[in-house]
Amino acid sequence: MTNTYEVMFRDLKNRIFHPIYLLEGEEPYFIDQVSDYIENNLLPESERSFNQTILYGKDTTVNEIRQRAMNYPMFSNYQVLIVKEAQMLKKWDELLSYVLNPVKSTILVLCHRHEKFDKRTKVGKEIKESSHCVLLTTKKLYDNQVPEWINQYLKDRGFKMEPKASALLVEYVGNELSRVANELEKLTLNVKPGKEILADDIERNIGISKEYNTFELNKAIGQMDILKANRIINYFKANPKPNPLVLTIGSLFGYFSKIYLMHQAKPKTDAEIAAVLGVSNFPMIINEYKTTARNYPKQKTEEVIALLHQYDLMSKGINTSGVDEAALLKELVYKILH
């Protein structure tokens, strides 16, 4: 049967267990959270040496997993068998007989990361439909969903974050939740509980400059702020390691692709703009996109996207040689702004 992440965690904390868990999909953070909780909480520490086994898909077989799952626990109500990187396994049909008749005292956890299990197979169909099997399918969050996830993550720990700070963090880290969670963990260790986390805290504790980053460069170019854009370019030149050209161009491409979408879809309200662009409906964010769309009509936006494609190739050594990244970026920004 299919379950949600929240319901699965609630049942585990209430010690409602099932014989088989299949954790699959694109977002490994949720898979790791569930498997780590089972590994660290289901059995008392004194029982784990005899009754808890962790296998890896590259080092085992489905047949071995089936045989181990059929064992009974020693001096315990349960044995836990966790299979990590299960997407590397072959011959899943060898597990069908066990899925049809699992050992109730075994808790088998299959961590099928980065991709979905094939539900067209007999094993897949049975796991999906059986009442003693729990299926969790994870999906990557869109960038505009990450700020809300950040807010909930921090709320559960007694913190909150201003929208500018969460936008800065998402721009820097992206939608890879494991990385986002690691950075949030740093923040919660250095900020007092109950205090709103600001962009200053991001800069101080994570090392992202709140003034000199791709997020601010996009904004400066969008607002035709030549002075600020040049300041950021000079900062990138002095600090090239955290600001590689290929990522800067990628960020600009994503930004102007959104502007092109606005010209195509012609949304009328702020809510429509947020929906079209896939961003949070914060006035600060929406107003920035409105300003950029006014400064860059459709034809100019198309020219900028073509420029970005050209300089992306050049940044990778195609159609150019011996030109340093700082010079390429300065030239690119000049052409966009003039």
Image (spheres, grey):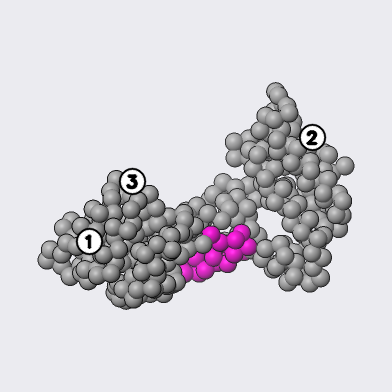
Magenta highlight on residue 141: yes
How busy is the neighbourhood of tag 3: few (under 14 within 10 Å), some, or many (20 plus)? few
Q: How far from the left and from the top, in percent, is residue 146?
A: 57, 62
Q: Which mark is residue 163?
A: none
Q: How far from the left and from the top, in percent, is residue 87?
A: 39, 53
Q: How far from the left and from the top, in percent, is residue 278?
A: 67, 63
Write down the quadrant of residue 73 in the picture: bottom left
Q: Which mark sits nearer the N-terminus, 3 or 1? A: 3
Q: How far from the left and from the top, in percent, is residue 164?
A: 65, 60
* Gap in angstroms between the C-alphas marked 3 and 1: 18 Å
Q: Which mark sits nearer the N-terminus, 2 or 3? A: 3
* Gap in angstroms between the C-alphas marked 2 and 3: 48 Å
Badge 3 amino acid: Lys
Instruction: State which region is magenta.
Output: 140-162
Badge 2 amino acid: Glu
Q: Which numbered mark, 2 or 1, is in the foreground of this view?
A: 1
Residue at which label 1 appears: 69
Q: Is residue 24 something that shows in the picture? A: no
Question: In this picture, is 182 found above or below 136?
Answer: above
Residue at x 29% of width, y 45% of height: 59
How busy is the neighbourhood of tag 1: few (under 14 within 10 Å), some, or many (20 plus)? many
Q: Which mark is residue 58?
A: 3
In the picture, the quarter occupied by the C terminus is top right
Q: Which mark is residue 331?
A: 2
In the picture, the quarter occupied by the N terminus is bottom left
Residue at x 59% of width, y 36% of height: 241
Badge 1 amino acid: Ala
